[in-house]
Image: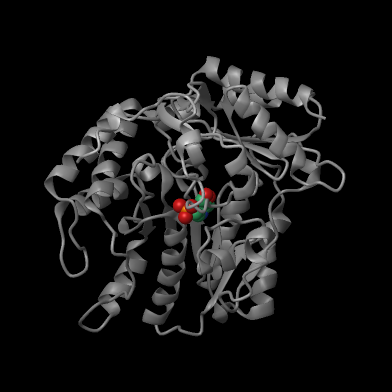
Amino acid sequence: MATDFATIDRAPDVADDLDMSHFWMPFTNNRYFKSNPRMFVSAKDMHFTTDDDRSVLDATSGLWCVNAGHGRAAITEAIREAAGVLDFAPTFQLGHPSPFRLASAVAKIMPPGMDRIFFTNSGSESADTALKMALAYHQAKGDSGRFRLIGRQRGYHGTNFGGLSVGGIGGNRKRYVSQVWGVDHLAHTHGDAARFQRGLQPSNGGLANELEELVSLHGAETIAAVIVEPVAGSTGVLVPPMGYLQHLREITKKYGILLIFDEVITGFGRIGAATAAEAFGVTPDIITLAKGLTNATVPMGAVAASREIHDTIVHGAPAGIEFFHGYTYSGHPLAAAAGLATLDLYAREGLFARAAAMAPVWEDALHGLRDCPHVIDIRNCGLVGAVELAPRDNAIGARGMEVFHRAFDTGLLIRVTADTIALSPPLIVNEAQIHEIADVIRKVLHEVA
Ligand SMILES: Cc1ncc(COP(=O)(O)O)c(C=O)c1O
C-alpha cells in the first residue's frame, strides 16, 4: 500500500517508536545521539518542527544547503511532477531533456566562459570530479607530468579520497592512511592578529606567496591544480584576506596551474552573489557546486568548467568517450527538476541580492556578541558567520557541543565545529530572525560554564 506521508503520525515522541539500531549516522556520536535523540519531523521556511512539536529556528540552512528556506512549494511541486513523468533515465550515451536545461541555467549564473557543466550527486563527488578534470586536462595537453594537487590546511572538500587528500582537517584525514599521492597544502588563511575583523581579513600578501614556495619545492611542471574554498566553511568559517584570491589567481596563471574554487557552500547566494568568484571578482578555471543547487531537496552536485578545459579534454580526445568519469545518477530527472525550480526561485525572489542586502545587519548582530562569555573571535562574510569560543581545558569541543545542545533546546539550530559556532541561515532570513539568532546565542553563552 502506498504511504500517505500527510497522514504519518507527527505526534510527540516519534523517536520512542523507532528502532534506532540500524541507521549508522554520519559524522555523529551515534552512542550519544541514540540515547538522547533530537529529531525533526517537518520544516517550513525558516523553521524545523521537532518530534515533540517544538519550532526550531534554522540558523544553518540545514547543513549550509537550504538557501531558499524549507518546504518551498515551487520546488517540491516540480519534483513531484518530474517523478510522475520520468523516474529515471541514464545519461551514459543517452539523454533526457532536464539536465541539459539545468546545465544551461547553471551556466548563465557562472562567471563568463565557465559554462560547461558536469553533474554529480554531492559536494564530495564534485570535488573529486574537479580534481580528475584537472588531471585529464593536463593529460589532454600532453602535460601528464602535472599530477600534484595542492589543497590548503583546514580546507574541506568532502569525504571521498580525492577531496580528503587535498582537504586539511586533521580529524577527517588522520585515520585514512591511503590517500592520493603527491598532494601538498598551503597554509590556512586565519591569523590571530585579525580577530574580530568584520568581513574580509586584512591583506596579507605573504599568504598566497606560499604557492610560489611550493612551486619552487615541487616544480610547476608537476603541479596540476590548486583547490581552495573561497571562504572556508566547515572548519569554522575562515574569511580570506583582501587580495588573497586574486593573488592565487595570478600565481596559478603564471605557472599554468589550474585554480579550483570549491563553492559547495559559497555557491548560490551565500555571500551575496551567485558565486564567490563573482563576489570577489576572481575567475577560477573550475568551480564545484552542490547543496544550494537544488535547495537540498534532491541530492545533486555540479562542476562548472571553463570552455578551455572542456574543449581541451573533449575535442582533444580520440573518437569515443572523452572523459572516463560519471555517476549513475548524474543529471537525475528529479534532481534536475529540483535544480531548475530552485534557480528559478532564487531569480524570482532576488535571493542573492537579498543576502547581500542583509549582510550588514548580520554582521552587526554577530559582532554584538563580542562581549559574551567565552568568545575569542567573530568572523563574517555575506550571510555566513562564526563565533569562536575558547575551548575548555583538555576538552576541545565540549563547550561547543554544550552550546549546540542548549541552543537546540532553546529553539535554535546552530552548527558547531569544535568550539566554533558556524552560522549560515537561509537567505530568506529577516531582521527579527537575525536578532533572535543572536539573542539565543547570547543567552546560551551566559548559561554555559
Ligand atoms: C566546501 C565543501 N566541499 C565539499 C563538501 C562535501 O559535500 P557533501 O557533504 O555533499 O559531499 C562540503 C560539505 O559541507 C563543503 O563544505
Q: Position of residue 389 (x, y in %)?
A: 76, 37
Q: Position of residue 12 (x, y in %)?
A: 47, 24
> Does residue 425 appear to the left or right of 420 in the view shown?
left
- Residue at 29%, 43% in the rendered image: 339
Work out whether residue 61 can be spotted.
no
Work out whether residue 301 can be spotted.
yes
Q: Look at the image and tell me in which quarter the C terminus lies.
A: top right
Residue 127 drawn above or below residue 178: above
Residue 167, quarter of the rendered image? bottom right
- Residue at 73%, 41% in the rendered image: 419
Q: Look at the image and tell me in which quarter the N terminus lies.
A: top left
Residue 413, quarter of the rendered image? top right
> Does residue 366 appear to the left or right of 79 in the view shown?
right
Residue 387 drawn above or below residue 95: above
> Does residue 133 appear to the left or right of 105 in the view shown?
right
Q: Position of residue 417 (x, y in %)?
A: 66, 45
